[in-house]
Amino acid sequence: MRKLIVGCGYVGRRVAKEWLEQGDEVFAVTRSESNAELLRSLGVEPIIADVTQPETLTAIPPIDTLLYAVSHDRSAGYPPRVTYVEGLNNFLKYAAHLPTRMIFVSSTSVYGVDDGSEVDEDTPTAATTESGRAYVEAETDFWRGFWRKHQDSRIGVVLRSAGIYGPDRLLRRVASLRNQDPIPANPDGWLNLIHVDDLVQAILKSELASESGTVLVCDDRPIQRREYYTKLAELVGASSPVFNSEGKETSLGKRCNNRLLREKFGLELRFPTIDSGLPHAVDTNNQER
């Protein structure tokens, strides 16, 4: 099978590794020659292109599966909508070949819920952040531009990912804890998380889905911010976290339900809560130093 990853970063490289081990031919879009060399060293065939520059997308080869997992680069100088909405539409419009199966990694930021209540795939999207609104628009365009036109011959899956954590994703937070930097958020607010290894497995499972749809990807237990940072502080030998919730006292976030992830994909999470996932991430970081 020929697979293409658009957004071959923290998550994408791990998916590429799994596909290569399956014997698949894996391509990845990258904007830089230096990253292209890294991809080649991993066994991935790079394609120099940029989703914000549609004329560069005409070299996309025929593929069977597309993983679209682009992250917004804050240093790029343009808003999230350019990356998530215009980039996706450029790909759907200008790529010479569209796949038979497309997996679009979205975000739980599409929900505007901030009172601590539970959300699932049926909860209306009413994003309140710039990034969340861009994801909502991108999801709409994904269904309209990819699946609806070709629903008899193509399968599309949208994965609404919770906050991704894992090895190499904790360093900034660890440094802040050790410095006793105040965390500007309500300690009683809810966090929804997914270990990167489990997100990768969800992506692999979604490739086998027999029908199109949207699935929320999070672990089994939403966790309050105070518990998360206290656990992380204990694991890295830092003092108890300090919070500054001024102006954010009523911001409680949401609690995501992963029932459909289990029912639709039959996925058994390797790290169902941070009780096992956070020590793994910290230990892996320590081993790699």
Image (cartoon, rainbow, N blue to C red):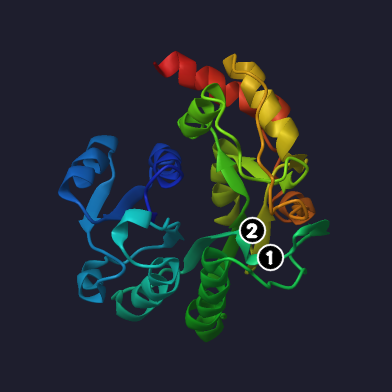
Using the image, determine if residue 40 lies above or below residue 174. below
Residue drawn at x 69%, y 24% is 231
User: Of 11 and 233, which appears nearest the observer?
Assistant: 233
Q: Quadrant of residue 227?
A: top right
Q: Give the number of the disc on residue 259.
A: none
Query: Is 252 placed left or right of 284 in the picture?
Result: right
Pick out the residue farthest to the bottom: 149
Name of the residue lying farthest toward the right: 117
Looking at the picture, which amino acid does disc 1 mark? Tyr
The residue closer to the viewer here, 221 or 115, is 115
Screen quadrant of the C terminus:
top left
Disc 1 crowd, CA 10 A, few/some/many (<14, 14-19, 20+) = many
Q: Position of residue 5 (x, y in %)?
A: 38, 55
**Residue 74 at least partly seen:** yes
Is 64 or 218 nearer to us in this picture? 218
Read off the residue under disc 1.
Answer: 111
- Give x and y (percent) for residue 103: 51, 61
Residue with the mark numbered 2:
108
Q: How far is mark 1 from mark 2, CA to CA? A: 6 Å
Q: Is residue 128 above or below residue 222?
A: below
Q: Estimate how packed mark 2 is, as few (under 14), some (14 to 19) or many (20 or more) residues with alpha carbons within 10 Å.
A: many
18, above or below 110, in the image? above
- Residue 244: percent from left, percent from top: 66, 41
